[in-house]
Each structure stands twice: as structure tokens, then as C-alpha cells.
Amino acid sequence: MKTLSYRILLKREPEGGYTVTVPSLPGCVTYGDTIDESIEMAREAIELYIESLVEHGEEVPTSEGMLEYILNIEAQAQYA
């Protein structure tokens, strides 16, 4: 079995909990009440996503070779 690496993004929601997205897997989104639960939910979502890709004979993308950079933009107060 090969180990694959994926970058996940957790966004704190105003009503509580965290929405998790996986940039390398379009549409792979999940939610958890805590950071730990969110990470575990992401692991499960990624595993199911990959399982579906394999069943349909599709390529399994990874985060390998992906670069990350945070770009700061000055914006008017109404957008901040």
C-alpha cells in the first residue's frame, strides 16, 4: 500500500466547528466540531474519494509538487 499526502484547509465557522477542504481533490469537503474531529473526518473523506476514483478507473491526484504561498492584498474595509 502506498502512502499519499494531502494538504487540508480548516476554516472556523461562525456557528462553530470547522469546514475542511482538500485542494487536490475538487469537491472533497467535510466538517467537524473540533480540530481533531475535522482532521479525522478529512481522513475518512479522502479515503472514500480515492476509493471512488479507483473504482471508476480515474487518476488519483496528490499534493506532491504543490507549492503554497499566502498573498496579502490591501482591500477596502467592506471586504475585510
Image (tube, rainbow, N blue to C red):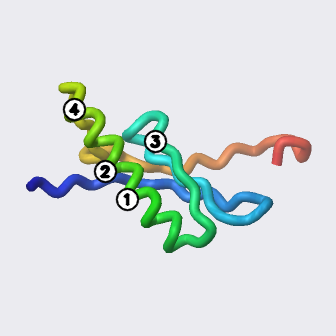
Label 1 element class: helix
Query: Residue 7 sits in which quadrant?
Result: bottom left
Q: CA distance from mark 3 to mark 4?
A: 17 Å
Q: Residue furthest right?
A: 78
Query: Residue 3 sits in which quadrant?
Result: bottom left
Report crowding for label 1: few under 14, some 14 to 19, many 20 or more residues within 10 A (C-alpha): some
Name the residue tied to disc 1.
Answer: 43
Circle 3: residue type: Cys
Circle 2: residue type: Glu
For image coordinates 44% across by 57% down, the residue present is 42
Report crowding for label 3: few under 14, some 14 to 19, many 20 or more residues within 10 A (C-alpha): some
Q: CA distance from mark 2 to mark 4?
A: 12 Å
Tag 4–tag 1 contact (CB < 8 Å): no
Q: CA distance from mark 2 to mark 1?
A: 6 Å
For image coordinates 33% across by 52% down, the residue present is 6
Which of the two discs, 4 and 1, labels the residue nearer the N terminus?
1
Which of the two discs, 3 and 4, labels the residue nearer the N terminus?
3
Q: CA distance from mark 1 to mark 3?
A: 11 Å
Name the residue tied to disc 2.
Answer: 47
**Percent of width and height locating residue 67:** 36, 46
Image quadrant occupied by the N terminus? bottom left
Tag 2–tag 1 contact (CB < 8 Å): yes
Name the residue tied to disc 3.
Answer: 28
Q: CA distance from mark 4 to mark 1?
A: 18 Å
Q: CA distance from mark 2 to mark 3?
A: 10 Å
Near-viewer residue (78 or 54): 54
**Percent of width and height locating residue 34:** 59, 72
Which of the two discs, 2 and 4, labels the residue nearer the N terminus?
2
Name the residue tied to disc 4.
Answer: 55
Tag 1–tag 3 contact (CB < 8 Å): no
Query: Residue 20 sits in which quadrant?
Result: bottom right
Tag 2–tag 4 contact (CB < 8 Å): no
